[in-house]
Amino acid sequence: MKFLIKFFGYLFGIGAVLGLVVAAGVWIYLEKLAEDLPDYTALKNYEPPVMTRVHAADGSLMAEYAKQRRLFLPIQAMPDMLKQAYISAEDKNFYSHVGIDPEGIARAAVRFVQNFGSGRRPEGASTITQQVAKNFLLTNELSVDRKIKEAILSLRIEQAYTKDEILELYLNEIYLGLGAYGVAAASLVYFDKSVHELSLEEVAYLAALPKAPNNYHPFRGRERAIERRNWVIDRMVENGYVSAADAEVAKAKPLTVKPRETGSQLFAAEYFTEEVRRQVASIYGENSLYEGGLSVRSTLDPKMQVTARKVLMNGLLDFDQKRGGGWRGPVTTIPVTGDWGVELGKVEAFSDLPEWRLAVVLEAGQGSAEVGLQPRRLVSGALEPDRETATLQLEDMKWARVGGRAPAAVSDVLKQGDVVYVEIPKDGSRYALRQIPKVSGALVAMDPFTGRVLALVGGFSFAQSEFNRATQAWRQPGSSFKPFVYAAALDNGYTPSSVVLDAPIELAQAGQETWRPQNYGGKFYGPSTLRTGIELSRNLMTIRLAQDMGMPLVAEYAKRFGVYDNMMPVLSMSLGAGETTVLRMVTAYSILANGGRKVTPTLIDRIQDRYGRTIFKHDSRICETCDANDWTGQAEPELIDEREQVLDPMTAYQITSMMEGVVQRGTATSVRAVGRPVAGKTGTTNEEKDAWFVGYTPDLAVGVFIGYDQPRPMGRGATGGLVAAPIFTEFMKEALAGSPPVEFRVPKGLQLIPINRQTGMRAVAGAEGTILESFKPGTAPPDTYSVIGFEDEMGVPRTVSPEAGAAVMTGTGGLY
């Protein structure tokens, strides 16, 4: 007996020693692992990559940019049902355990022994806290060391953070498939809803995803996804979060997913959105754009943007059908034997042309063609099973000239297997044949007082070409630059009634042939007032005016208005021979429209960081009393505008009045159809390579440019007045519909005096050929007839009697 006692005592002693040795070894092992553990307190400063969102002026979502599509959502803002679903699916004891779940560990150990040697992945036993430790601080390495580190960190995290803080980290970090990180982003990506709008079955589906998002893909793994979703609902019932009746209703519902589009979200705004993206990236860098969680409020007016896109597209199509050279052939050709829908479905259509569809010609005859329309893709990515057909009529494709002649039969244009674009009828009428125009253009609409860009279209289709012709295309403005030459003159002693000679001129150019500029049409009209010169866009008058006051002055004003940065002071530049952009031109015209105050164009009103702090604001006006806590009878706050006065307000009105004449009597009479006061100027470059119209009402400035990307002649007669002005007109009519007409504001002190339109001299009010002209204080219509450029050409004094002046105007004074 004593022997047994000694023996067992001996074994106990050895066991105790071995236990201490093992314990010491475990302690040393754990200490060594703990030495390399990351600093869990860094979670306090958690700033995950968050997507940047861009909104229009009315709050409409324009675009989202992210490397990881995530929206950070505070735990207090998450609905209880959402939290309950994830706790039920991932860690039902979350609010009671200390960071690890012994019961789960034991269950995982048993399964490990049972599956040993089977090659199956060991079953996890991770709590939500352990998943936070792994996702934030560790790797996905599958090893005992990593699991132990995870457990140690979990215990420490539970001591340093509340349960809600841990759950907040988890629900904002987890990857849930389709590029979505966190529950807020996943709710938008899968259902296009905020988390507060989710139903029970939708919440349960999101909670089913953390295990393996790809396994529960809503389309590729639909059955498994529904099975997993219903399992989550059952767990919610088991945990007392949902009633059995509500659960059965939710489980019976189908899995209805509405994937959210990426990139531009607002129709017709692709060019605008991309320009905003470029500007934000240039200010704050790519990392801030894609990870900084910025909130960008743009200046875009969605309704005006849709109008801008429509009128520019229609204008380009009209030009292409009338002047584009006819039919240029199909998009491609495909076989039409068998199921043509499958082959047609493989042809990529431009995504930003919802008015058009691709179609394949099934049969082309004399007077019509039968076409099969491209099947639309379902949410699942599959094609519509039905095959829709339509008929194209010969009378709708007379524009599709072949060899310079209108087609006599549909078969002259189309053949079986041709893939073409057709326009969807808007009013129940027929489908019509269409083609992407070669000519392109741009339109910009701006608030002339703030520089806020309200609409911007940079081409026919962003999907076809991302090149933005409103901001990136440097083109010659032609005669649309002339108002700044005339503004420089009016600001420096000339008046609208000053007379300039319109006659042939020869200018020697160093090392080059003598320059002999011409008016459009090749005619000369003798002495004319500045008003007449700009109304009828007289090139030779502009050159003589610029020569008289000096090109350095013109160059200074061009820079002051932002048309050119450093214009060469040569006379050809007075006719718009330099290169600028549509956005610059509209900005310059806005200065004329607002009374001469400098404006800085902007597509962005405000940018906020992820915490809601404003880090950028376009409006720099000062308002010292705008932050009053309450109203105590004080006067309305006043905004202090310290922007530079680029032009005398009186000069701005004078040039505006003269450009009203361009619309009323000059080269842009088609713009009168707007039906309200409009000032503007046409622009046409040599060989009609560029066509412009830039103009404004008292509260809206708009510029339109038309031309080929690789500059080439657009055809005789393709002037700004005939090509660009109609687009401007249609835009203004729609953009201003419903608002009352407003007259241009006349500055105080400006005098309106009746003059003779031809001579520029004082006249009797009401007499034939008399108009009211604006004069600054200290200036008045001349009493003698003085012709700028007359002395240089004729070798006689410029100042003559009114009678002699009249003789010159009528052609009896010896000039012609």
Image (spheres, rainbow, N blue to C red):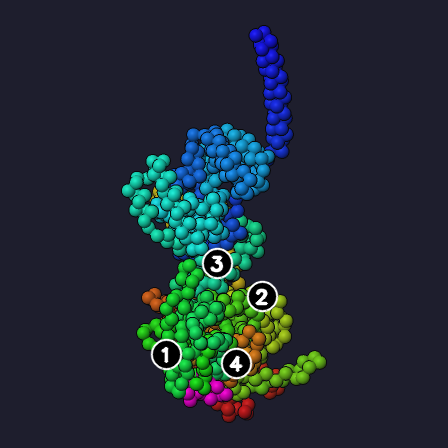
Q: Quadrant of the N terminus?
A: top right
Q: Residues within 10 Å of mark 4 (few under 14, many from 20)?
A: many
- Residue at figure coordinates x 28%, y 42% from the top left: 245
Res. 496 visible in picture = no
Residue designated by label 2: 559
Query: Which numbered circle lies on residue 714?
Result: 4
**Gap between marks 4 and 2, in whole Å?**
30 Å
Q: Amino acid at mark 4?
A: Met
Residue 70 belongs to the span the image colors magenta: no
Secondary structure beneath dot 1 equals strand
The residues colored magenta run 400-410
16 shown above or below 316: above
Q: Tell me, for residue 263, which label it has, or none.
A: 3
Amino acid tagged 2:
Lys
Are the two marked residues, 4 and 2, in contact with CB atoms closer than 8 angstroms? no
Residue beneath disc 1: 391
Give, as a three-letter code, the residue at label 3: Gly
Report crowding for label 3: few under 14, some 14 to 19, many 20 or more residues within 10 A (C-alpha).
some
